[in-house]
Amino acid sequence: MEDDLSRVLNALPVLIWTALLDGQIDFLNRRWREYTGLSLEEARGSGWQSAIHPEDLPGLLERWQSILASGEPGEIEARLRRFDGAYRWFLFRANPLREEAGGIAKWYGTNTDIEDRRPEEEALRARELSWRQIADNIPGLVATMGAMGEVEFLNRQTLEYFGKTNEELKDWSLIGVVHPDDLPRVIEARTKSIETGQLYEVEHRCRRADGVYRWFQVRGLPVRDVEGTITAWYLLLTDIDDLKKAEEALQSSERNLSLTINTIPTLIQVSRPDGTVLSVNQAVLDYYGVTLEEMQTDEFRSRAYHPDDIKRLREWRREALKHPRRFEYEQRALGKDGKYRWFLVRYNPLLDEQGRIERWYTTAYDIEGRKRAEEALRSAERDLDLIVNTIPALAWSARPDGSAEFFNRQYLDYVGLSAEQAGGWGWSAAVHPDDLEGLAATWQRIMTSGEPGDAEARMRGRDGEYRWFLFRASPVRDEQGNIVKWYGTNTDIDDRKRAEALLAGEKRLLEMVAGGQTLPSILDASCRLVEETAGGYICGILLLDTSGTSVGLSVAPSLPPSYNEAILGWPINLDSGPCARASVLKEQVIVADVASDLQWDAYGWRPLALSYGLRACWSTPILSSENVVLGTFALYSREPGEPTAQLQDVIGQMTHLAAVVIERQRAVERLEAEQELLDLAQKSARAMAFDWYVQREVNVWSPEQEALYGLEPGSFDGTFQGWKKLIYPPDWPVLLKAIRHAQETGVVAAEFRVQWPDGSTHWLATNGRMFFDERRSPFRMVGFTTDITPRKLAEENLRRSEAFLAEAQHLSSTGSFSWRVATNEIIWSEQLYRIHGLEVGAPVTLELIRTRVHPEDITLYERMVEQARSGGSDFEWQYRLLMPDRSIKYLHAVARATRDRDGGLEYIAAVQDVTERRLSEEALGNLRSELAHVSRVATLGTLTASIAHEINQPLSGIITNSSTGLRMLNADPPNVEGARETARRTLRDGNRASEVITRLRALFSKKEAATEAVNLNDATREVIALSLSELHRSRVIPRLELAEDLPPVTGDRVQLQQVILNLLRNALDAMEGVEDSPTPLVIRTERDGDDSVRLSVRDAGVGIDPQAAGRLFDAFYTTKHAGMGIGLSVSRSIIDSHHGRLWATPNDGPGATFSFSIPCWQAV
Amino acid sequence: MEPSQIRSDVEHPLVSVVDDDESVRESLPDLLREFGFAARAFSSPEEFLASDAFEQTRCLLLDVAMPGMSGPDLQQELRRQRKEIPIVFITAQRDEAVRSRLIEQGAVECLFKPFSEDDLLKALNAALRAG
């Protein structure tokens, strides 16, 4: 193509060049090279500059650069050197060639000889040269003709070309000059021009002198006189032979193109703007087996195209044809073989200069193969869909971004979501919250890696239960290797997970065994392990006692301790319970529904189990390696039912494991016990032993034995008398008696006291054996002695305690009772009879007690009895008795629920007569409020200023009025009426003063204010502590928001506490009657600026009446029914004297906040 | 202005009483009139400033503490308006510190309620001399 272009450019009779974007010339056509005499190699790049006149070069280059920079066409004139060294003026023209996108692809330029047009020279030449000379110098063939076509003048070049003289060419016969083939056209054109006076223009071949025909473009311009009549014709003959040759080449290549088009298998069609067919290539005709004419009929269209496609595409195509834009569609076309094939049909518009559609070039590619592949794929997808939905796994697919687009039926069935709900990231709702983050991270990692990967997580089934799944994902890639999709499966690995967990748990248990943990703690862990593994079940392990007749240990960590306590000691037989039966039968016992299985009533197991919410029990015996029952392993369910096979596995494993653990632990314990015994025996033998050879009076004592008698080692003399001296004399007879007993039986046993050298007595017990000689005389006594002082003391204490208890009950007014709920058997202590004012020993019944209970507390009493019967838990209550003498007793009972020997519920309770305490509490409460009142009054000393103000006002009125009155009476004449008025006012002001005094009657003392560093937080806490009873009565719990690091303030602690108390009391009063306040009373301390501290009390009370706001702090102003109205006034006085300020603000919500701010403590 | 009023102004200088206490407003003007002054009473500085007495007052008997504008506030306001009315403060709060501060700030006197006839007269005379 490039070559073709070069060829064309080379053929053009114009100086042409092309340049790259940077201005480097990369091509100059042959005419340019011939003109300058430079070769392509010499001129290319910047070499062409050598052909430019040196004076013009800088300007030219500058201009060239600016054209390049602007990207717009441009021109400049400069002198170009001809091959012979002569310079001629040329117009250099440059045009950018733009790509479709608008960017410049290349520069094209022409150099046009304008030497003759240079204006200054033109004038010169006009003067110097004749027309002939001009004509002779025109680089072309020029001729003039008369009005009728007769030749008048031919320039030199013309004569030279034809090789004829002017005279020879005068009678221009054309024959022998014009190519015979062209002659008719030439004559026709000339005749027409002469007749019409129009521009004459024709291309024809002219015969050169050497006989060669060359193509010329001949243009004839008519020359008219003033009347417009043609007087002559000027003819210009331009040699266009090269151009013609190029065109011919082009035409031939067009023919080639056509040939190509007709041979390629693509169907090509050219159509009018409205889409009607103009021409098609051979492939089209071959495919349809028709002629072009047949194709152009409407009938063809409806026959050749698939009816569905016609329907589908008709309107759409008609619309698309209206727009000058490329479009395409797919349709089926009927071939001559009678079969439809799919084609991709593409319309490309050919636009004219105005952008209108001139032609549509249409190609149709056979895409039948692709379509078939697609169809196959679709069908494969359908199959896949079928497979995916039938495989017994949860399958899904996701988009490259990880969001899910498909789930198989099993998946949706399992999670109980619709495809819409699960789509995108909706599925994640079914993932266990604890696993979600990890799963998301792994999924992200897998997607990033682009490699298959997996993760484990729990998914919730539609039944709400979580199961473990293995999430596996693999990418599907397109041909370019891009991931187009992820396919994944979720495999249920719950069983495996459980097995793993069980295994890990077993390992843990065995480690516990090895680590020497106690059996109960190991069994506890075993139960928890099973509960974790099985999920939703309760596990219990029973161990038989050594006799095998009752429960020796019960471990069930998920049941309340009371259950295990109740089971402890439970008899083991066929009917006493499933675990017991399993132990007896040595086989598993299944109780599928506890509620309906009445065979477990005999020993009360059924109600017991039901009371703990156990609805099913599956008990399996734990057998030792010798097939001896060690205990049972039981699973309980809150729902009736039988164990699943999976659970049975777990039970089997755990039962075996429990047997191993228990046996091993028992062995260890036995070993340890034996070892201990051995140690003890050895120690005893060695340590506190004596060996008395009775006849020889040799008594050998170990140092430990000596220590028991308070002797230094080796200081015992070994004699009978020496020993006797050590015995606490009152106990000697006991020993003599023991010795006599030993002489009869050989058994030595005695408990006695010894007196140590320091005078203290110690209890000893001696045990041993007496040996006899053949005459049955004792000769040796061996034994050991132990210190039993602590035990003896304990026994002593117990005796004493028992004696004391009765006394204590009496003294503390505390009675006790026991109550067997099942039998209503109630036993009272003596003191309890006394408290109730009943005869000691009288049979006690609930009815009897009821007669003593205060009528107002009867309901409470009955509710308590009811609760105690059903509950089985500890309780505590307070109630009153109404005694026959109408006196009231306050009782406080605390009862503890226990089990009696038969497993029945029994309460053991203490009942205290708290009447005195209650009365004294009430008295204390009264006293406290008195104190508060006094305290309030006491600080009124600080009110002096306010008081003075209140009294001075009326006093001022009294004095002024009196003065006025006197003056009025002294006037001449006396103003009696005026004086009467002043006297009336005096009276009124006097009364006013009196009122003030009345209200102040309680205020008497004045206390000097101390100045010290006061911590407001501590002060606040003390006030709260002092006010607790009042706060409780008000049912208000204040919230303290005390700033840490609060600096101390300067002031009088008591006065400031009075302010806090006043504000607190003010808040409580304001909140009185405001029910269920959402915001509590808040007392807050904080810094107020750099040098002050603020305390505020925020209440949720009735708030501040705006009208009263201004008077809040006035003395004796009060909105309360009770109170003197001096609290806030006093507070303000106190705070004023502390150089602080006190103010109130309404809250945003309910209530008001009272605050004061006082300066921080300044250490001197 | 009528000639008689001018005379009356000269012979009976107007003393205005500003006090929020009603008994003071009732009793004090009567006494002042007995002394031979013209007297008017106002319950607040605002009321006084809004009245025509403002121009004619020769002496002001002014309470210290009042709701809204206080006595010293009125003193400030008068100074701002360049009205040099001699002021005698009357207060029920016996506080020497306050008294000396008020006098320092230009008051002729500060009387503590209750005050005697003599003290009042002395203060008024001093005020009228000052005016």
Image (tube, rainbow, N blue to C red):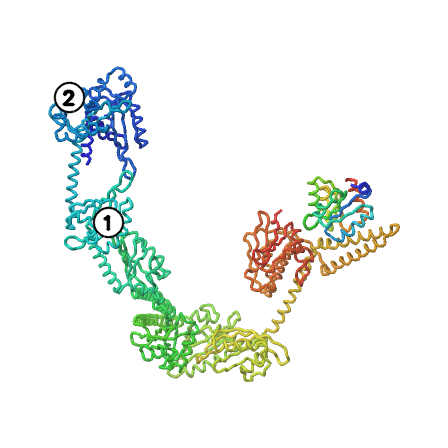
The x and y percentages for residue A723 are 47, 75
Assign a secondary structure to mark 1: loop
Along the viewing direction, whichever of A1057 and A512 lies nearer the viewer: A1057
Question: Are dots 2 and 1 on a single chain?
Answer: yes
The x and y percentages for residue A971 are 87, 50
Distance in Å between CA atoms under marks 2 and 1: 76 Å
Query: Which numbered dot is residue A480?
Result: 1
User: Is residue B65 depicted above or below A688 in this figure?
Assistant: above
The x and y percentages for residue A629 are 33, 76
Return the disc, 2 or 1, that comes first in the chain's sequence: 2
Query: Chain for mark 2?
Result: A
Tell me, yes or no, if residue A40 can be seen here.
no
Q: Of all residues shown, which one is farthest toward the right? A: A972
Three-letter code for the amino acid on which mark 2 is drawn: Leu
Assign a secondary structure to mark 2: helix
Left or right of A572: which side holds A1086? right
Three-letter code for the amino acid on which mark 1 is drawn: Gln
Along the viewing direction, whichever of B61 and A76 lies nearer the viewer: A76
Of circles 2 and 1, which is in front? 2
Left or right of A1046: which side holds B6? right
Query: Which numbered dot is residue A955?
Result: none
Left or right of A1128: which side holds A750? left
Q: Which residue is drawn at the image coordinates 51% and 79% (left, top)? A: A818
Q: Quadrant of residue A372?
A: bottom left
Contact, mark 2 vs mark 1 (Cβ under 8 Å):
no
Residue at label 2?
Answer: A169
